[in-house]
Image (cartoon, coloured by chain):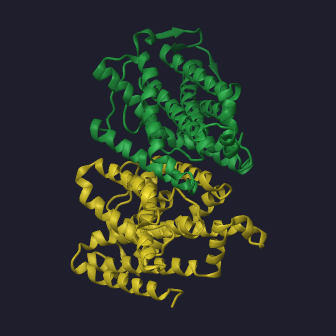
Chain colours: A green, B yellow
């Protein structure tokens, strides 16, 4: 048994891995929030509820239709994304001309409705979701046993984050999107259907949340509160990173997850609040956030 | 009088009359709950209605006020008015620290920062030994005013709560109609312009935030005396959401709106309590309806119909 700073290695790496996994979820959720904020100028308070919905949809697909984990990793984000598109078309789009705070209040209300409905239907205790057979078990990587599913979550999160970044920064669609974020009227004058672009962006951001939800289902029990527990921390992550940069929110998400994991090793009592402390320090030193642009 | 317009004077007189006479027909404990939440909502409205900043973490000040008042009454045996004052001081102290951090950002970021800071307070309360964790502080005695007038009787404490509420309400009204309040409105309407006129807008925002959190603490302290209990529910973020909803439903930036909002929401929760999670669904639904079709709120709509500022 080896140790680092008097902490047994397996414990340290175990917590580091847990931190990395939380960080993966922070990254995916804050990325979605940043993408939506860039285009719609609203903070999507329903993001946590939609994340939870992703987990529930995959659970429902398995339970009632026998559709397994990997198909639902594609299906659930599509279904929840469609739900998001309907939401954007029917209610959110009415608010673009108003103060942005109304968008926040509206999505908060939607989150309450979604969570309340799921709590009515399934209770608050939570349901287990079985890890797919191929990802069962653990691999010995020399210094620790690495549970396969957890490794997969980190890999999948990195892949989907990179893909999102690449779409926004490297493709023509992304270029149009970024242009519309800066000057919507001008882009519209060039013949781009900006309202459709906005709708698709919201759908995409929501699908990202749902994807994270499916990934989370086997780790945390599928319960109506899982989104809320995450999203309040994610808001702090977003404040720390600033919403100006796609890459920034990904990096901040992972970094804060790791910081949280390390705090769990060295000072367990502070692990629930450490991200908020980081937020306070960032607010004092760099009020715009680490990657934020001037307001 | 007191900066009230004629119509507001009439509305105020009606409100006082209702406070005085409704215990004859309604359960006093229910009315006290309404009054505590009404004061809380009025305090919250000071920020959103007059500075235009949405604080999504007001439960932190309400809850901490409630905890400190409950703890001091239970362990030090202080009299009721001091306990309520302690609640207010707690709200002020916490509001000074957290407000100082939060006013660095505006708009949506302000909402997220206040929410995150309140979440930090929640985790603190969850772990700190003095709050009693999941149990909360229970069986808090109601104590006595000035150590003499016992508050055991529901009607006795009712008059105290009414006095606290009316005092807070008039104070808020006075703040809004003072030169200070006019500057706040100027900041809400056009902050760069207020800055260019030489006002240090951050100072004004912070002072307003502290006033708001102080009154939230007072409301929390009063609540814990009435019910003899201070729990995690008071600091939970859903409480922050509830006070936003009360104010939104009653009418953002109206004088009487938060009171009406608190009355409607508390009544609704009383009737829907046995329906469990449907309360959350209903609350969310009211949020959506208010934002989409009803942005002026109940009092705002009535005021617009009658062409009066209520």
Vertical side of A137 occupied by B104: above or below? below
Q: Is residue B19 toward the left or the right of residue B68 in the image? A: left
Viewer-nearest residue: A177 or B243? A177
Q: For residue B176, what is the image quadrant?
A: bottom right
Q: Position of residue A140 (x, y in %)?
A: 54, 8
Viewer-nearest residue: A230 or B5? B5
Q: Position of residue B22 (x, y in %)?
A: 27, 79
Q: Is residue B146 toward the left or the right of residue B1 in the image? A: left
Does residue A149 appear in this view? Answer: yes
Label total for image: 0
Viewer-nearest residue: A91 or B88? A91
Q: Is residue A278 toward the left or the right of residue A51 in the image? A: right
Which residue is drawn at the image coordinates 59% and 20% (left, top)? A159
Q: Position of residue A114 (x, y in %)?
A: 38, 42
Which residue is drawn at the image coordinates 45% and 12% (left, top)? A135
Q: State the residue lying farthest toward the bottom.
A: B1
Does residue B150 appear in this view? Answer: no
Which residue is drawn at the image coordinates 54% and 17% (left, top)? A151
Q: Position of residue A289 (x, y in %)?
A: 69, 44
Which residue is drawn at the image coordinates 48% and 16% (left, top)? A149
Vertical side of A95 occupied by A249: above or below? above
């Amino acid at each position: 048994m080896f140790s680092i700073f008097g902490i047994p290695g397996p414990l340290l790496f175990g917590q580091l891995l847990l931190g990395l996994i939380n960080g993966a979820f922070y990254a995916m959720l804050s990325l979605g929030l940043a993408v939506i904020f860039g285009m719609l100028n609203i903070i999507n308070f329903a993001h946590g509820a939609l994340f939870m919905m992703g987990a529930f949809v995959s659970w429902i697909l398995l339970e009632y239709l026998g559709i397994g984990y990997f198909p639902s990793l594609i299906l659930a984000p599509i279904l929840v994304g469609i739900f998001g598109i309907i939401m954007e078309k029917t209610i959110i789009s009415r608010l673009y001309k108003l103060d942005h705070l109304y968008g926040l209040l509206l999505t908060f209300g939607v989150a309450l409705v979604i969570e309340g409905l799921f709590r009515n239907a399934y209770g608050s205790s939570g349901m287990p979701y079985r890890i797919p057979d191929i990802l069962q078990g653990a691999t010995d990587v020399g210094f620790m046993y690495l549970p396969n599913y957890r490794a997969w979550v980190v890999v999948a999160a990195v892949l989907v984050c990179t893909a999102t970044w690449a779409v926004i920064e490297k493709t023509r669609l992304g270029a149009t999107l970024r242009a519309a974020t800066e000057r919507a009227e001008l882009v519209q004058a060039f013949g781009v259907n900006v309202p459709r672009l906005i709708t698709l962006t919201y759908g995409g951001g929501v699908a990202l949340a749902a994807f994270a939800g499916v990934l989370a289902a086997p780790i945390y029990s599928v319960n109506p509160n899982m989104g809320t527990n995450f999203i309040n921390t994610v808001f702090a992550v977003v404040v720390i990173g600033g919403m100006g940069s796609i890459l920034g929110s990904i990096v901040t998400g992972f970094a804060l997850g790791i910081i949280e994991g390390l705090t769990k090793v060295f000072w367990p009592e502070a692990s629930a609040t450490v991200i908020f402390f980081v937020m306070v320090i960032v607010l004092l030193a760099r009020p715009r956030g680490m990657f934020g642009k001037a307001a | 009088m007191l900066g009230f317009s004629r119509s507001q004077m009439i509305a105020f007189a009606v409100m006082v009359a209702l406070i005085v006479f409704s215990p004859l027909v309604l359960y006093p404990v229910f009315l006290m709950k309404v009054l505590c939440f009404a004061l809380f909502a009025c305090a919250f409205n000071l920020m959103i209605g007059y500075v235009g900043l949405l604080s999504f973490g007001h439960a932190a000040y309400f809850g901490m006020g409630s905890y400190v008042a409950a703890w001091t009454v239970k362990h030090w045996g202080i009299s009721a008015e001091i306990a309520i004052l302690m609640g207010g001081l707690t709200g002020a102290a916490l509001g000074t620290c957290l407000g100082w951090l939060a006013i660095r950002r505006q708009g949506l970021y302000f909402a997220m920062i206040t929410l995150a800071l309140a979440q930090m307070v929640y985790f603190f309360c969850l772990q700190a030994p003095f709050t009693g964790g999941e149990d909360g502080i229970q069986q808090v005695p109601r104590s006595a005013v000035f150590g003499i007038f016992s508050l055991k009787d529901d009607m006795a404490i009712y008059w105290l709560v009414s006095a606290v509420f009316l005092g807070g309400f008039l104070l808020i009204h006075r703040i809004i109609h003072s030169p200070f309040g006019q500057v706040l409105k100027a900041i809400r309407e056009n902050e760069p312009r207020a800055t260019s006129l030489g006002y240090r807008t951050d100072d004004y925002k912070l002072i307003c935030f502290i006033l708001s959190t102080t009154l939230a603490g007072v409301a929390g302290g009063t609540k814990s005396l009435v019910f003899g209990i201070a729990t995690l529910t008071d600091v939970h973020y859903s409480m922050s959401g509830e006070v936003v909803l009360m104010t939104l439903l009653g009418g953002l930036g109206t004088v009487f709106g938060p009171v009406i909002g608190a009355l409607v929401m508390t009544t609704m929760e009383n009737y829907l309590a046995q329906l469990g999670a449907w309360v959350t669904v209903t609350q969310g639904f009211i949020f959506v309806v208010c934002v989409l079709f009803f942005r002026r709120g109940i009092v705002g709509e009535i005021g617009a119909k009658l062409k009066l500022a209520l």
